[in-house]
Image: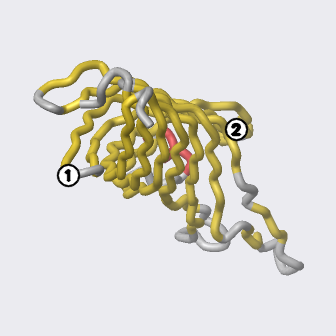
Amino acid sequence: MTAPHALWLSLGLLGGPALLDPGLSDYRWNVTPRSAWGAQALAGLGPWGAGLRATRTRTTQTLGIPDPGSAARVDATTLEWVGQGRLASIAGVEMLASGSAGWLHLGYTPDHVDVPSGGGTPLTVELAPVNEWIAGAGLGARRAIAGPWVASVGVERRFFSMDTAHRSGTTIVMERERFGDWNARFELAWRWTRMKGTS
């Protein structure tokens, strides 16, 4: 357990499954569970900590152009400010609550599609990247395992919004919708600790 007046710094690697919002399947996204990975750097005093986290995962979106089965890869990258606090300690295991806020970038590969135009030059449609704010909250547990190494596990729910377009009868509806994802993260981190006031 981290002492109440201990200064600490941790650098960790993250990995685990991610589950996208089922609502994205309405826009032909593949929302089956997939792996996510990243890194995290935190600094804190006693039970409180804050820092930066970067994560990445990928899926596909079916386009149907130029053929019905064609799809683009969607890479989702986040850079977030993370804060966490210890709720309790049980048998050497720290129970944690966390919150996050930051930036979500969605990039497409390929980043354009050529649409047939009835015998003439194909029309090129760009798949522009999407940049949005993202925020979330979660719960987790952390335990020292050997020397400066600590392991943690947590579950987080995050939310973001995107501009969408879909057909309703003969009308194209443009609106802004909110989506979310679930993440179960495992972290292995190197942790440096110093009691406040010591040299």
The residue sitting at 58% across, 30% down in the picture is 178
Q: Is residue 60 visible?
A: yes
Q: Is residue 38 above or below residue 178?
A: below
- The kind of residue on which mark 2 rests is Asp
Quarter of the image for the N terminus: give it. top left
* Closer-to-camera residue (199/66): 199
Q: Is 177 situated left or right of 117 in this image?
A: left
The residue sitting at 46% across, 31% down in the picture is 44
Q: Is 193 situated left or right of 58 in this image?
A: left
Earlier residue among tags 1 and 2: 1
Helix, strand or loop under label 2: strand
The residue sitting at 40% across, 55% down in the picture is 13
- What residue did someone put label 2 on? 163
Which residue lies most toward the front here? Answer: 199
Q: Where is residue 153 drawn, in percent x and y?
A: 28, 42
Q: Where is residue 37 drawn, in percent x and y?
A: 42, 56
- What residue did someone put label 1 on? 146
* Closer-to-camera residue (47/96): 47
Which residue lies most toward the left here? Answer: 91
- The kind of residue on which mark 1 rests is Ala
